[in-house]
Image: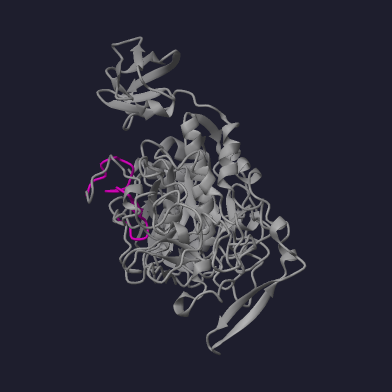
């Protein structure tokens, strides 16, 4: 993928007779390509239950340098690994006592990283392990490479002219909002290649909701600058952790993870200061949830209104400067997001489209079967997120993974986003037409503004040529001195959809409505704005490409008729989506409570009731647990092992729930 999206340029590989965690055999795949992207000296192995039982007996349930074994005690495996000499075995996913049962149900506990010397022939280790009956699957661990230039154009408020709202008073006082056509496009624009309403229709949606801090979006990308003035108050904060701690204070398997985790470097310190950082993680995060109405910077889709907080942003860093993350980093980040409360997965990366022009790109997967066969571990991690994020008692049961569709101008979107369970996003310009670089066709679900510098090239001067047609968002100050700038790509369209999903879930939270993830996705698609009504397919779309080596402009054309019916269900429409949510879903149920002996669990009553004034609680068996209501919070303390019923009353409404007290409830919670 070019421009500002991210690509994983190579596949994982599976073994001869691969089985999933319930033992269903799958077809033997083609032999993997051991290219430059392969991490030498290690493989990712899915063992059967017998092997894992032995490994766990040895105490290997966590991951990290201090939790490895140098022998596995399985004769057949030992025989194969004799060719590797010294080796170490480490569990892929560290144990999180709060979610271990769910992880085992998905089969994630079966995956281990096997490390050995880089001089050991990887191909032979892979082949020999694949033949073992005790091994269900073998994957190469491959580097996830960025295939975009990282180029951004700095926002210069002294030289910029407002593009939108020329005749209106802005909803928010953020100084950059008049330049964010992708949020509010009223047609009063300096260039003529903009159409009124060619945005995500969020201005009207803000009348209903501006975001809610109970909704967490995990950003898998470069790091988010948690000190940025527009982002610092939007960050998810792990209240159970301690900044720069050397201990895993909350027991989730990751030390010191306050704002998320840097999986690329294996550290809790989220970084954006590397000389090679592009600021991409900040840029997508800003589109979703930068703080609104704070008198500075940009506005965002779900960043609150200044008096109330918007959605929270969790930084799951899988790229760091020139340091490429790996598939191992990616899958750990996905599970981490689900386990720590995220319900939307923002993924501005993916494999090149299988329909990409082979002259310019390396085509990858064309079918679900090809992707699933080569990427067992990746699919398992994503399945875990979409099945286990959220809560049956919360706003959403399951999680929603949103992917960039790809920037190869190909008639099929890239994987993993092309898979039916995920949302794949194509990009549009400021007049509803497809962006010149966007993938479209098979696998595309929905479109959103992604910017189109080539289309708007004639509008601007010097390094700013066409930047006004791109997406304006936050950037680290080491990338641009103003802290804001322009980027383009389906990786910019992607956070517009993630942001609208998060805004819709925020509205559902305010309405105390509950949805399954699949229901939210259906409403997202059915509420989209049809694009073709704005196209004149009798005339091609002309755009300008600057040919740098010749120093000239080269005008090209797009046949819009080729895109008809192939940009998904239309352009994401925030207001229509929120209105669709109003009449859908079911009322939230009040959750049963799990608490440890001598520990306390706290629930926010406003999550479940319109008003909390005069709320009271009664517990049937006061020897098992006590409960009280203070300042709109229900506080439940475990006194002795056992169960008791309880009733919470607010006004004329009463709801029964069960309190379970046990010794091993990791940190209290709701069921």
Please indicate whether residue 237 sits to the left or right of residue 581 in the image: left
Asked if residue 263 lies in the magenta stretch, the reply is yes
Q: Quadrant of residue 483?
A: bottom left
Across and down, in percent, residue 612 comes to 38, 22
Q: Nearer the viewer, residue 250 or 136?
A: 250
Reply above or below: 451 against 78. Answer: below
- Count all numbered tags in the image, as a single digit: 0
Residue 505 percent coordinates (x, y): 50, 39
Which residue occupies the foreground of this view, 280 or 68? 280
Which portion, as a residue range, is magenta? 246-267
Residue 94 part of the magenta-drawn span: no
Residue pictured at 29% horizontal, 20% vertical: 638
Quadrant containing the C terminus is top left
Kindly report the secondary structure that dominates the magenta region of the rendered protein.
loop
Q: Nearer the viewer, residue 657 or 583?
A: 583
Specify whether residue 137 is in view: no
Identify the residue at the far bottom of this view: 550
Position of residue 217 relative to residue 370, above or below, is above
Name the image quarter holding residue 531. bottom right
The correct choice, above or below, for 272 with respect to 556 in the image is above
């Amino acid at each position: 993928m070019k421009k500002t999206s991210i690509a994983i340029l190579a596949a994982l590989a599976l073994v001869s007779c691969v089985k999933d965690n319930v033992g269903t055999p799958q077809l033997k795949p083609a032999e993997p390509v051991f290219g430059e992207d392969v991490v030498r000296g290690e493989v990712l192995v899915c063992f059967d239950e017998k092997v894992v039982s032995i490994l766990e007996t040895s105490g290997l349930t966590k991951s990290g340098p201090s939790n490895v074994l140098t022998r596995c005690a399985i004769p057949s495996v030992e025989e194969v690994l004799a060719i590797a000499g010294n080796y170490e075995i480490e569990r892929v996913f560290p144990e999180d006592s709060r979610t271990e049962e769910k992880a085992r149900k998905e089969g994630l506990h079966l995956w281990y990283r096997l490390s050995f010397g880089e001089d050991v022939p990887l191909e032979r280790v892979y082949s020999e392990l694949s033949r073992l009956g005790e091994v269900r699957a073998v994957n190469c661990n491959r580097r996830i490479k960025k295939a975009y230039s990282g180029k951004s154009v700095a926002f210069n408020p002294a030289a910029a002219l407002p593009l939108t709202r020329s005749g209106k008073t802005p909803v928010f006082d953020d100084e950059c909002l008049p330049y964010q056509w992708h949020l509010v496009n009223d047609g009063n624009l300096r260039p003529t290649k903009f159409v009124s309403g060619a945005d995500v229709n969020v201005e009207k949606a803000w009348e209903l909701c501006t975001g809610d801090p109970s909704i967490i979006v995990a950003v898998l990308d470069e790091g988010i600058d948690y000190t940025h003035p527009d982002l610092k108050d939007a960050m998810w904060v792990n209240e159970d952790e301690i900044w720069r701690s050397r201990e895993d204070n909350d027991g989730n398997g990751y030390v010191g993870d306050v704002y998320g985790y840097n999986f690329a470097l294996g550290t809790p310190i989220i970084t954006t200061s590397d000389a090679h950082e592009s600021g991409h993680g900040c840029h997508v995060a800003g589109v979703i949830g930068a703080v609104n109405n704070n008198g500075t910077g940009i506005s965002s889709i779900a960043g609150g209104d200044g008096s109330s907080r918007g959605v929270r942003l969790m930084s799951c860093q899988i790229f760091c400067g020139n340091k490429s993350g790996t598939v191992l980093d990616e899958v750990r980040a996905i599970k981490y997001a689900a386990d720590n409360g995220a319900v939307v997965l923002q993924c501005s990366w993916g494999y090149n489209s299988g329909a990409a022009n082979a002259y310019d790109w390396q085509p990858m997967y064309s079918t679900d079967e090809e992707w699933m066969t080569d990427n067992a571990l990746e699919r398992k991690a994503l399945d875990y997120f979409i099945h286990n994020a959220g809560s049956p008692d919360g706003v959403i049961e399951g999680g929603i993974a949103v992917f960039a569709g790809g920037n190869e101008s190909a008639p099929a979107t890239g994987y993993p986003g092309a898979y039916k369970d995920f949302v794949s996003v194509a990009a549009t310009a400021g007049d509803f037409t497809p962006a010149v670089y966007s993938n479209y066709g098979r696998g595309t679900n929905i479109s959103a503004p992604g910017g189109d510098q080539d289309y708007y090239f004639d509008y601007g001067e010097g390094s700013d040529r066409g930047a006004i047609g791109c997406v304006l968002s936050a950037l680290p100050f080491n990338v641009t001195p103003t802290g804001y700038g322009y980027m383009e790509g389906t990786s910019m369209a992607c956070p517009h959809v993630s942001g609208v999903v998060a805004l819709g879930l925020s509205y559902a939270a305010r309405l105390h409505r509950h949805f399954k993830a699949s229901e939210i996705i259906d409403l997202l698609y059915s509420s989209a704005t049809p694009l073709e009504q704005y196209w004149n397919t009798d005339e091609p779309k002309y755009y300008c490409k600057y040919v740098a080596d010749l120093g000239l402009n080269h005008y090209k054309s797009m046949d819009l008729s080729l895109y008809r019916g192939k940009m998904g269900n239309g352009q994401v429409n925030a207001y229509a989506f929120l209105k669709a949510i109003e009449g859908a879903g079911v009322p939230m149920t009040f959750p049963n409570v799990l608490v440890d002996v001598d520990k306390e669990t706290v629930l926010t009553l406003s999550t479940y009731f319109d008003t909390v004034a005069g709320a009271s609680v009664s517990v049937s068996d006061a020897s098992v647990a006590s409960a009280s209501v203070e300042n709109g919070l229900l506080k439940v303390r475990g006194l002795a092992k056992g169960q008791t019923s309880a009733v919470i009353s607010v006004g004329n409404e009463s709801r029964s729930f069960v309190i379970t007290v046990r010794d091993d409830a990791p940190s209290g919670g709701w069921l």
